[in-house]
Amino acid sequence: MIQRQSKSLSFRPFLQVTARKFGDASDVTYEIFGGDMPERLSRAVRSLLLPGQHLDEQNLRMGNRVLVELNNLMANINMSRPRSINLLEWTRHLVVQASSCGVYGNYHPLLNPKVEQAFWKWQEYLPMHLAGFDPLGKGYQHRQVVYDAYIEYCRNLPEDGSELARVHKRIMQDSGVDELDYAKQASLFTFAVFANTSVTLYWTIWELFSRPSVLSEVRKELETHAIQRTEDRTGEFTLDLAALKSKCPILLSVFQETQRTRHVNASFRKVMTDTVLDDKYLLKAGNFLQLPGHPVHCDTSLWGPDAREFNPYRFVPTRKKQVETLQPNSFVAWGLPPFLCPARQFAAAEILIATALLAIRADLLPRCGKWDPSPALNYTESSTLLNPEKDLRVDVRSREMWTGTWSLRMGESIGRIPLVSG
């Protein structure tokens, strides 16, 4: 019902607000965001993030950086000599580095640890900045560190960056956005990817590793379908992304069930013209409509009597009939049509690659000795899934039979990851 009113109930005005509040848009750039530029940019972005050559190239750079981070994590550890990490801190670092490599190339603007740290500090101030409140200016100081890195990077985009980054620059500058404002807006381009993918990866790892029997099944399907080792068993392994996407349904189900049960973000629309919904409800122009996701994902009429429970097998083929008969607005973790997250295939690939490599190569155990069944959550930050209130300290041990040299085989992205949202 709401999807059919996409012109009268629009997400577009929020892009203009974001450009000003988070991207420090000048008056000229602000007006440009109020025109047709966001729609033209959105069409180009959606096209470049569809399965095909450009997404393949992004995924390859991203996946190779995930491998680097996993190799760094697993270096010089074994079952008797673990490494202790803060899990959320690690997933954040991995996502920032891997996503940035995918979009901006190997010499991306967040390589410097100080810039990466400033980004996460800036995130803490986003609700205040949306309200125009930061009396001491600390959040703006962190933001400026990120801006400066993007200003330097955006002067000359490197050749190993993505077509997505090049088209983003071309459309904005052809629309009249100057060099400085373009660089500031570029700092927002992967904004949601960093914040939302990292916490989703954190909870996907948490949900999987806290269920040993499910973890065992995921490892089995990875070993059977998605991982090849050299015949002479010399310790060379390859993760096949095409098989990971299509032949590991339990892992994909755990990921999507994590989204379903932990998604809290609401979708927003501005009422552009007086609109009547269902011949009953009058929405007056100028008001805002909030569409919370959590009640939808807990609705027993949509998801059955176990809607409030975590079922790791909910999205596997045995439940295919139920999944196929879901209404289009039953799963809203990626937003609501027609404003679905355009990067969902890229983000999902990153989460699946990272979780698969960690599952097959490592054992994780909280330092406290067990997985807390109901960890406290942080309600102050703005992301689609709530971050934990306290980071989880875990010991990482290597699985000796999977120690060796790892590579990725990307194949061709002729098929999508079979997400509920497409």
Image (cartoon, grey):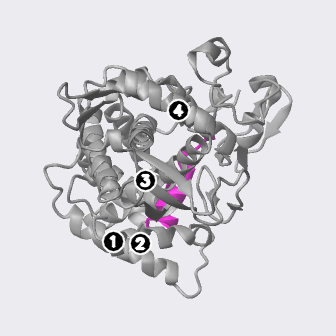
Residue drawn at x 35%, y 75% is 114
Name the residue at the right extreme. 280
The answer for how far apart the CA atoms under marks 1 and 3 are is 25 Å
Q: Nearer the viewer, residue 84 or 51?
A: 84
- The residue under label 3 is 397
Residue drawn at the location 55% of the way across and 54% of the way down:
365
Q: Which amino acid does label 4 sit on?
A: Ser
Disc 1 + disc 2, Cβ < 8 Å:
yes
Alpha carbon distance from label 4 to label 3: 16 Å
The numbered disc on residue 200 is: none
Q: Tell me the magenta residue range.
A: 9-23
- Which structural element holds mark 4? helix
Instruction: Inspect this view and state whether residue 30 appears.
Output: no
The part of the image, by quadrant, that contains residue 83 is bottom left
Answer few, some or many: residues within 10 Å of disc 4's Cα (few below 14, many 20 plus, some between 14 and 19). some
Magenta residue check for 18: yes
Mark in the foreground, 1 or 3:
3
Mark 3 or mark 2: whose residue is earlier in sequence:
2
Q: Which of marks 1 and 3 is nearer the N terminus?
A: 1
Residue at which label 4 appears: 216
Q: Which dot, 3 or 2, sits closer to the camera? A: 3
Work out whether 184 lies above or below 400: below
Quick one: label 4 or label 3, which is nearer the N terminus? 4
Q: Mark 1 points at which residue?
A: 113
Where on the picture, by quarter, is residue 10?
A: top right
Q: Which of marks 4 and 1 is nearer the N terminus?
A: 1
Task: Give the distance between the C-alpha atoms of the residues marked 1 and 2, in whole angstroms.
Answer: 6 Å
Where is mark 2, residue-wise? 117
